[in-house]
């Protein structure tokens, strides 16, 4: 059971990512796409890190898009932190919880 939860969460994240941009609203941002350019990339992780150290501002929708670690780790808090940046980078590099997930693009 412990192994299936990360798989289900990963699939949930991928389904969210795969939704067409037109179907999304400000209340439903794409998880991981913090800068809103319809791509999940290292630039999103960098934006999260800049926010964490106070060098960038994030809108409420961007904070929702950035706050993903709670989906993977029970102990994660609902706040934007370095764990979120790490998960975005792991998604980009198909490592960590994404290492068995085939590329969707
Ligand atoms: Ca992006």
Image (tube, rainbow, N blue to C red):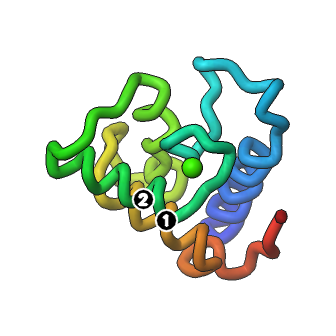
Q: Is mark 1 on a helix, strand or loop?
A: helix
Identified at 18% across, 46% down, the residue is: 55
Are dots 2 and 1 in contact, CB under 8 Å? yes
Q: Dot 2, how many residues are within 10 Å of its Cα: few (below 14), some (14-19), or many (20+)?
A: many
x and y percent of residue 50 in the render? 26, 52
Mark 2 = which residue?
Answer: 45
Alpha carbons under labels 2 and 1: distance apart? 5 Å
Residue 87 lies left or right of residue 30; in this view the side is left
Image quadrant containing the C terminus: bottom right
Q: Quadrant of the N terminus?
A: bottom right
Q: Residue at x 68, y 59 (%)?
A: 10
> What x and y, as percent, mark residue 44?
47, 54
- In the displayed structure, 6 sits above or below 47; it is below
Q: Nearer the viewer, residue 39 or 7?
A: 39
> Which residue lies under the disc numbered 1?
42
Q: Is residue 36 left or right of residue 70?
A: right
Relative to 23, is 81 above or below? below
Compared to residue 61, the image places residue 49 above or below, namely below
Figure quadrant of residue 41: bottom right
């Amino acid at each position: 059971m412990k192994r299936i939860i990360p798989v289900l969460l990963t699939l949930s994240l991928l389904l969210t990512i795969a939704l067409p941009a037109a179907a999304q609203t400000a209340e439903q941002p794409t998880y991981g796409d913090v800068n809103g350019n319809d791509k999940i990339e290292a630039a999103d992780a960098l934006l999260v890190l800049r926010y964490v150290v106070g060098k960038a501002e994030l809108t409420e929708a961007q904070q929702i898009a950035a706050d993903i670690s709670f989906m993977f780790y029970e102990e994660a808090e609902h706040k934007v932190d370095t764990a979120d940046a790490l998960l975005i980078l792991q998604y980009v590099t198909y490592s960590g919880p994404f290492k068995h997930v085939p590329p969707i693009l």
